[in-house]
Amino acid sequence: MSGVVERRSLTETGARLVEELIPDEGLSLDIREEIHTVSTGFRILKTEPSSSFSAFLGKNYPKVSDAFSGEIVLKSCGKTEHSFFHNDGPIGEMTLAMETDVDLRQSSVGMPSSFGVAYMSASRGPRRQAVLTSSRVRGSEPCVVMPQFPVGSSLSEMYTSFTPSSTAEQEIARTLLKRLFSMKRPVSQDVAETYGSVPATLGLIRDERMQRFEFEDPLFSEQARVVNRALERALLGQEMGVFLADEIRAGRVGEQHGDARAFDNLHFVRRKDGGIEAFIRDPVRLSRKTSGGPKLMREWFVTHDDLQAGMLIGGPFVQERFHGFVRNLITAYMDSDPQNRAILTNPLRSQLFGLGIAYGVSIDLAVANYHRRDLEHRLDTLRHSDSGRGTEEIDAQFNERVRLMDRYWDSLAFLAETDFVGWKEAL
């Protein structure tokens, strides 16, 4: 299997809920804000609240409908050139369809974080509007239709406003794991061996982010070099190769959600019964540019359960105030399947779980670096402007971002020094 993206119709990718949401004449929405994602170049439109969307939530998801304002978020391919990913044309459309197909599987355990692929015609002018239709019309483009999570629903904001009780953390962890693995799908032995092998796992861990830190970033190149060599040693050992081959034959490698980062992609809302519902947003389904054409980054999401669960807690692992959440998630993972208790007793499974944590840390580190580079650019612009005003505030934000990145590097160095099993001691 080559991994080249297949050209399929959008409706072949699974169930869609948008037919219930969008009337035959279409759904008109006022656009409040437009964002182009820095990392992947997709276009995000945030809309004003919609009464019809609120009614849709109330009818289909009464337990959580009160937590949402009725705003809809629309994610389309975007038109900007990206140096690494394909995000436009038929390939971009296919990544949207695949993302939605995976996202909709969360509906098996509660409200999904997207409602399917629709077609959008966006106007420009004083009153910007987007018209959604269930089928393509002239000039429209496909988009993912998602609910807008309320302000204060992220993990960081939850722990800033209050510290959840241990009981609440346990509930969050259990719900989160159910959603994470509801998106898992079995794959054939051939696919698992091709994309779940040691070389592919190495590519998953030591990917372009860590390469760029090592070879293109003088501020952090030495830290990246040390961590990258440790990742190679851990994954290229003969024992790990045999172990992963056995795990593939045992069916513990499957197609899973690829980007369940705790800080960017997890949201929490209160249900009517007072409980907490966890959501995972934005699974990554991207295609990278190669000399042979676009190649689906399948190795991002054909992965081992331990690696996937470890990745989930990478960001929170770095900061002590989230360690209660991390401990509860580890416990919930071990309780979800008797085999998972082996992450504490089997050295290779402990190491694989730790490698997942390292991968999660590296992703959040790269996100922090996007913000650092943006602040760097703004500082440079202000210093070369006539007034030069505003540099102190931006400079303070920049220094705080670098301090945060230092904490991430400290955690990666600790994991590397302990052959990625030190996570057990840290908690």
Image (cartoon, rainbow, N blue to C red):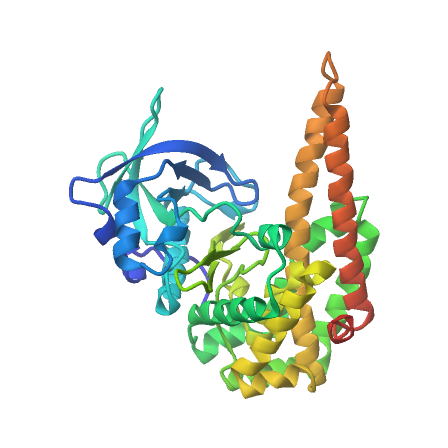
| Quadrant of the rendering where the C terminus is positioned | bottom right
Name the residue nearer the viewer: 204 or 269.
269
Looking at the image, residue 92 sits to the left or right of residue 324; the answer is left
| Residue depicted at 48% across the width and 69% down the height | 175
At x 70%, y 87%, the residue is 345
Instruction: Decide: is 331 above or below 410.
Output: below
- Residue 66 placed where, x, y %? 37, 52
Residue placed farthest to the top in the image?
Answer: 386
- Number of on-image labels: 0
Looking at the image, residue 77 sits to the left or right of residue 290; the answer is left
Q: Residue furthest left?
A: 24
Residue at 52%, 85% (x, y): give it.
249
> In the depicted view, which residue is nearer to us: 149 or 394?
149
Q: Is residue 416 above or below residue 344?
A: above
Measuring from the top left, give residue 3's x and y in whole percent: 46, 62
Indicate left or right for 112 with 222 as reference: left
Question: What residue is shown at x 55% (from left), y 73% (from top)?
Answer: 196
Q: Position of residue 111 (x, y in %)?
A: 37, 61
